Amino acid sequence: MKEEKSTTAVSGYIAIVVLLIVAIAIFAGAVYNNTWMVALGIPISLAILKGLTVINPNDSNVLILFGDYIGTVKKEGFFWINPFAVRKRVSLKARNLNGHKMKVNDKLGNPIEIAAVTVWMVKDTAKALFAVDDYIQYVQVQSEAAVRHLANLFAYDNFEDEEATITLKDGAQQVSQMLERELNERLERAGIDVIEARITHLAYAPEIASAMLQRQQATAVVAARKQIVEGAVGMVEMALERLSAKDIVQLDEERKAAMVSNLLVVLCGEKSVSPVVNTGTLYN
């Protein structure tokens, strides 16, 4: 597998000076009817012109001479390069790959929609051009495969898998780190460095979204009711202890049960309670 090697190029300004000298020689040959000078000067000037190139910041030129990789010029500036060498421009800038939404199954088999954004750049120009057919398409395909694989490893949430320590919904940081690590492993062959990878869209598939929403709502209601009941029991316990400690009233077991029942109804009820005054006793 080819690996990147840096190479230098002749300054383009030196080539311009040589071109001016050759142009003067051609003019002098034309004036003094020196055909040899003209015949040699024209192809030399054309070769100089063809070899002139400009390399912008964060760009590179990969040079191939007669099928042989001779090096990569990464230094920005104005250069003259062998006119017989094929120059292939490779950008070294960071790029965004905004993946489209994909429908996949999570660890528990639930259909979900997921999408990710990947920030990447070319690290090795030789691998990018010679190790794969099209490195941009290679990044797209491998990114999609990595996201699918990651979605299959974890559950969407821990409603069905309570022992799950990492889920797609709640473990965003860990999931993003794992995605970035897997992408770097997959794209190393193409000389690509993944700077960042994050999940940008995560949702249940439309066909089960309604059912999952109802399940989440039911879970929230149960959790809220549990909290209310725990608070109500604590308040009833505190009331009984205070009444007993201050010896305000002596309650037998039956009256305690009635008091607990009434307090729980008042504290746990969803609507305002209308009190009923009992003028008798519990025994009449």
Image (spheres, helix red, strand yellow):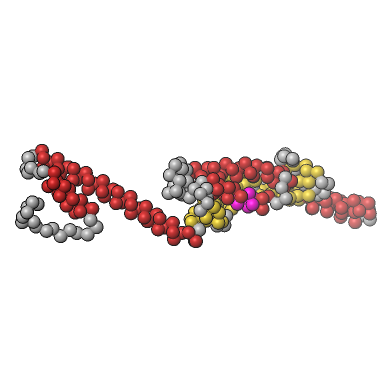
Residue name at image x 94 percent, y 54 percent: 35
Q: Is residue 204 toward the left or the right of residue 146 in the image?
A: left
Q: Relative to residue 275, is residue 113 drawn left or right?
A: right
Magenta stretch containing residue 222, yes or no?
no
The spot of residue 236 in percent (x, y) is 18, 45
Q: Where is residue 137 in the image (x, y as percent from the top left)?
A: 66, 53
Quadrant occupied by the N terminus? top right
Q: Please give left or right for residue 66 compared with residue 188 in the image.
A: right
Q: Can residue 98 be seen in this view?
A: no
Task: Point out residue 10 in the picture as x, y percentages from the top left corner.
Answer: 75, 43
Q: Nearer the viewer, residue 171 or 250?
A: 250
Q: Which of 71 and 118 is in front in this view?
A: 118
| Residue 245 against residue 264 in the figure, above or below | above
How many badges with numbers are in the image? 0
**Residue 212 makes an appearance in the image:** yes
| In this rendering, position of residue 156 left or right of residue 240 | right
Q: Position of residue 167 (x, y in %)?
A: 47, 46
Magenta part, dominant SS: helix
Quarter of the picture containing the C terminus is bottom left
Which residue is at 7% across, 42% downward?
250
**Looking at the image, which is closer to me, 235 or 201?**
235
Does the magenta run of residues contain 142?
Answer: yes
Q: Which residue is drawn at 87% across and 54% down?
A: 42
Which region shows up in magenta?
139-144
Q: Which residue is drawn at 8% across and 39% down?
A: 246
